[in-house]
Amino acid sequence: MIAIDPGATGAIVWDDRENGGLRVEKMPETQKDVADMLLEARHDGNMVCYIEKTGGYMPGNSGPAAVKFAKLCERAEMAAVCAGVSLDRVPPQKWMKSLGALPKEKKDRKNAIKAAMQLRFPNIKVTLWNADALAIYCYGIEEFNKRRSDRQKEE
């Protein structure tokens, strides 16, 4: 499983089986670097990538910043497609809901997500740039476990 927070200050997280742990990397700066990282992260053709699904333009935000963010999101999605990794787009409200109640104010919410990930991953240096990607990864684990449980019940 791979998790991506596609923003310029985002990150990519995956289970690095070869090195026996979770790998957390800052979002690469170029399309090729993103694709290369996802190819490295891909263990087999059955990998799933949970990526933050972003909405459209929000009134009050800078137009050029919105365009830049949209390009970053598309770059990460195209890299996943090129790496042969299936995509599961997750709205922020959905993965955040899995963490429980969070503050409404953005700065407080970001710090609460960081604190929750520090508790969950004590051996990883959790920062504001990687906390959302780690939380998306946790959401992906929960979804994977739910789907496996549902399949077992059907059998």
Image (cartoon, grey):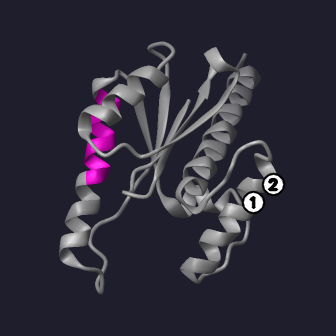
Image point 76% across, 24% down: which residue?
Answer: 153
Q: Amino acid at mark 2?
A: Leu
Tell whether 144 sits left or right of 74. Answer: right
Report crowding for label 2: few under 14, some 14 to 19, many 20 or more residues within 10 A (C-alpha): few
Q: Secondary structure at mark 1?
A: helix
Relative height, residue 105 to residue 75 (above, below): below
The answer to whether the residue labelled 2 contacts the one labelled 1, judged by CB atoms less than 8 Å apart, is yes
Can you tell which quarter of the image residue 105 is in?
bottom right
Q: Is residue 2 magenta?
A: no
Tell whether 106 sits left or right of 27. Answer: right
Relative height, residue 2 to residue 125 (above, below): above
Where are the magenta residues, as a range? Answer: 72-81
Q: Which residue is mark 1?
A: 116
The disc placed on residue 6 is none
Quadrant containing the N terminus is top right
Can you tell which quarter of the image residue 16 is in?
top right
Q: Amino acid at mark 1?
A: Ala
Image point 58% across, 62% down: which residue?
Answer: 128
Q: Which residue is mark 2?
A: 119
- Measuring from the top left, give residue 72's x and y in whole percent: 29, 52
Quadrant containing the C terminus is top right
- Measuring from the top left, give residue 19's x and y in whole percent: 65, 19
- Measuring from the top left, give residue 39's x and y in whole percent: 39, 22
Separation of marks 2 and 1 at Cα, in angstroms: 5 Å
Relative height, residue 112 to residue 5 (above, below): below
Q: Secondary structure at mark 2?
A: helix
User: Which secondary structure is most common in the magenta stretch?
Assistant: helix
Can you tell which quarter of the image residue 32 is in?
top left
